[in-house]
Amino acid sequence: MYGRMYRIDNLNVFIDLSTYCNAGCPQCHRTDPNGLGKAEWLPLIQWSIDDFKQAFPPHVLDVCNVLNICGTWGDPFMNKHIGQIIDYIVDKSDCKITIDTNGSIRDEQWWWELGVRSGKQLEVTFAVDGTTQEMHQRYRRYTDLNTVLSNMKALSETEAQAGAVTIQFKHNQDHITAIKQLCEDNGAEFYKIVQSDRFYIQEKLHASFEFVNEHGEADQLDRATIDPPNSHVAGTGGKRNLSNQITCRWKFDNKVLVNIDGQVLPCCYIGNNYWARKIASKGYEEFYNNTVIKQYYATQDAHNIFKNSLIEILSNSKWFNHILPNSWQDVKTTVRQCSKHCSGLIKTKQQLKGYIND
């Protein structure tokens, strides 16, 4: 017998609904750093409204507190059914809906109408990385700053909540105050700053991230050299005690991930590696050969939301409720992503170095 890893109420569910994106951000998982197109191994997928209804019928929505429609593999608003999906959630539940977007998609009227229909249940975070188009597109390639600001402003004029996020690099670090003001002038009710963790490659922190841009030219992003107030490095979380004990931050917050293929996974750190290995069919050997992960792969059909309900998976899964949490007793044998992101000793050492990579 084994207990439950999750409380089957007030679930915080992260969902990927699309691998389509209009942007070409150099450090994004889906971007090929050689030309800034889509990574060749990534298939183009998007959930239909029928897919969403199958995965999240009303009785499943009833146990969800927050639905975070995330953009790990694409921008959620590139999904042509996203308006219908949001309408369905609002009609069938009281779930809070949070979505991150580059914001350079659709027009002001569409965003205003979405906000009117969704009201206070909807919160959207727009990516604003500069005060000018030149500064903004140093990272947010193929997006238009004026469109982002106009769309954010339109949503803010409804009861829905609009906010903004900036990824800080060296090229925009001296303009953070001005960027924040620009966002507030265009309706942002909240503003946050994050620092990229993608400069930490193969256990070594680099000052620059090199890539080939859309014009076929050698290019690079430089890591920020100053820390903004109240910022965090993506993937770090708060400081932990100096111990080897693993405390799963996603479990603590009752969070779970539903991947683009319907697989239910414990977090984005494991989820990203699972999906990349599954699609590429090579690489990620240390992850793939881990005993705990092999047991997940052996039972992956039982953990797919299109084959079993989310409630059944989280209630009855031996892997979620026994195998994975039991592995946390030893950081040497557990999944590396667990020891890397949720182990007190390892995490604190990495924070002292500055960055943690996914």
Image: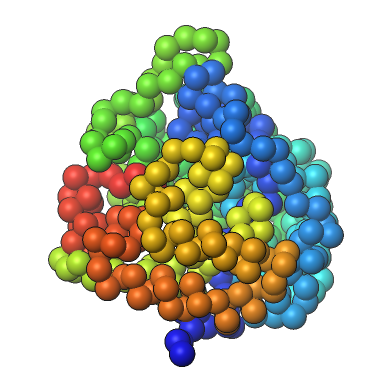
Image x and y of residue 100, in percent: 58, 50
Image x and y of residue 192, in percent: 44, 50
Q: Tell me: 92 left or right of 346.
A: right
Q: Judge by depth and name the residue closer to the eye, 27 or 310.
A: 310
Give the colour scheme of this rendering: rainbow
Image x and y of residue 346, in percent: 21, 57
The number of callouts visible is: 0
Instruction: Please say if 2 is above or below 64.
Output: below
Quick one: which residue is furthest to the left in this view?
Answer: 242
| Quarter of image, res 263 | bottom right
Q: Judge by depth and name the residue closer to the eye, 141 or 178.
A: 141
Image x and y of residue 14, in percent: 58, 61
Residue occupying the point 27% across, 73% down: 329
Q: Tell me: 169 left or right of 260.
A: left
Q: Is residue 132 in sight in this rendering?
A: no
Residue occupying the point 49% across, 72% down: 319
Q: Is residue 322 in sight in this rendering?
A: yes
Residue occupying the point 76% across, 38% down: 106
Q: Tell me: 331 left or right of 294.
A: left
Q: Judge by depth and name the residue closer to the eye, 63 or 227.
A: 63
Instruction: Please say if 132 is above or below 252.
Output: above
Instruction: Please say if 308 is above or below 227.
Output: below
Residue occupying the point 38% across, 21% down: 210
